[in-house]
Amino acid sequence: MLIGSPRERLEGEARVAMTPDSATQLQKLGYQCVIEAGAGKLAGFSDDLYRAAGVTVVDTVDALYAQADVIAKVRPPLADEVSKLAPGKTLISFFYPAQNKDLLEQAKGTGANVIAMDMVPRISRAQKMDALSSMANIAGYRAVIEAGNNFGRFFTGQVTAAGKIPPAKVLVIGAGVAGLAAVGTSVSLGAITYAFDVRPEVAEQIESMGANFVFLDFAGPAQDGAATGGYAAPSSPEFREAQLKKFREIAPDIDIVISTALIPGRDAPKLWLADMVAMMKPGSVIVDLAAERGGNCDLTVPDQKIVTDNGVTIVGYTDFPSRMAAQSSTLYSTNIRHMMTDLTPKKDGALFHNMEDDVIRGATVTYQGEITFPPPPPKIQ
Ligand code: NAD
């Protein structure tokens, strides 16, 4: 069978779902690989590098979709791309089926099978395919680099002949995958790093990384309803008040805020409010990784960088993984390759779409002309 990756159509998207290295691995599974000309260019992979890895380069997206049995891409397909699918073809990409109902209907109508990388169940066995985590890790790292790029001072403190320089103080809000990557990066650059999460179990992890967990003096229930599967639920009103009070206390002293707080299936909680921004020193920076879901800061403008009247820069970019396209393509294509390994148990270049497999079932959103989203809960936790 043939597996192919097109050039990403979304304006500004630099990632690619197949790299020369991942193509080599896919060929070991028995697949032939094909790529649209220029697909890897923005991520640093030339057509010649693909050819050297045994990949066929085709000139047009139509030729790619016509030839490939399996199409691997990064971003959810555009309607035009979905229209090129057909029964017997499999599309593997981010899809966000809950937010893309029309696209899901359209995909169903083509009779193709669609595997959504964002729906891979977050169970231990599937970690190697967890593209959400590999992209969040990059976003967390890059958020700190972006903050540094917009911050006019050092992260680390220095004593120089020209004077003593205090270390920067960084607050990371939300310590999931992206937040912990931000904590690690900030600590390694020498900033005094604080982190906060509604899930108290992360305190130990944060402290083991050399950062300080921001504790709240709060005795009541932290969350409205039970959190599921290690994820956060919305905070109770009392907890939220305590959290905002704490943030107001520390806002004047914090130089950089990296906010990553998300609750599955909801808009991002507003946690860094306009009055906190107003309390920050001129030159301070906020990087809001929750911008795509509305932002944790109520002044964030998605996809833009703004500077407030009091001189605080707020970065609302939503494309951090694409800004490190070589790294993110390498990790994402590896996630795809692991998915293909599970889809090819006999390593014979023939895809076996096993709907009895929890991971494959969980990620499949259309199958043989039916919508298969949402999936049943996985049997293995
Ligand atoms: P996420 O991106 O959904 O959320 C980011 C963080 O925001 C979470 O840590 C969440 O607790 C936090 N948050 C929510 N509301 C908040 C608030 N009001 N204030 C402060 N923080 C708030 O989460 P994620 O990065 O995808 O990961 C969430 C959990 O899932 C973590 O425990 C992670 O370790 C776990 N996980 C497990 C696997 C696995 O395969 N076992 C894989 C990935 C993630």
Image (cartoon, rainbow, N blue to C red):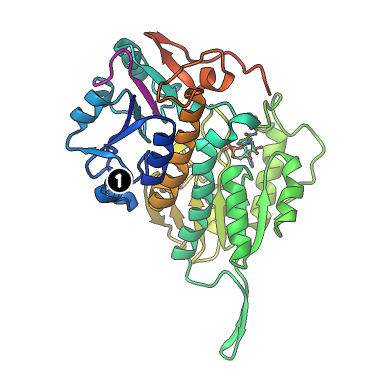
In front of the other: 145 or 54? 54
In front of the other: 69 or 313? 69
In front of the other: 221 or 8? 8
List the residue tagged with mark 1: 50
Q: Is residue 296 visible?
A: no
**Which quarter of the picture shows residue 57?**
top left
Q: Is residue 86 magenta?
A: yes
- In the visual, does 90 lie left or right of 152? left
Q: Is residue 90 magenta?
A: yes
Q: Main secondary structure of the magenta part?
A: loop
Name the image quarter holding the N terminus. Answer: top left
Residue furthest to the left? 59
For label 1, count other residues whose C-alpha is less than 10 Å away and answer few (under 14), some (14-19) or many (20+): many
Secondary element type, mark 1: helix
Total numbered badges shown on the rendered structure: 1
Image coordinates for residue 18, horizontal then vertical, percent? 37, 39
**Which quarter of the picture shows residue 221?**
top right
**Which quarter of the picture shows residue 253?**
bottom right
Image coordinates for residue 211, horizontal then vertical, percent? 70, 58
Image coordinates for residue 45, horizontal then vertical, percent? 32, 50
Q: Amino acid at mark 1?
A: Tyr
Q: Which residues are magenta?
A: 84-92
Q: Residue at x 48, y 15 (%)?
A: 373
In front of the other: 354 or 163? 354
Image coordinates for residue 209, horizontal then vertical, percent? 70, 56
Q: Residue at x 40, y 41 (%)?
A: 24
Q: Residue at x 62, y 66 (%)?
A: 191
Name the image quarter holding the C terminus. Answer: top right
Q: Residue at x 66, y 16 (%)?
A: 379
Q: For ligand 1, which image quadrant applies?
A: top right
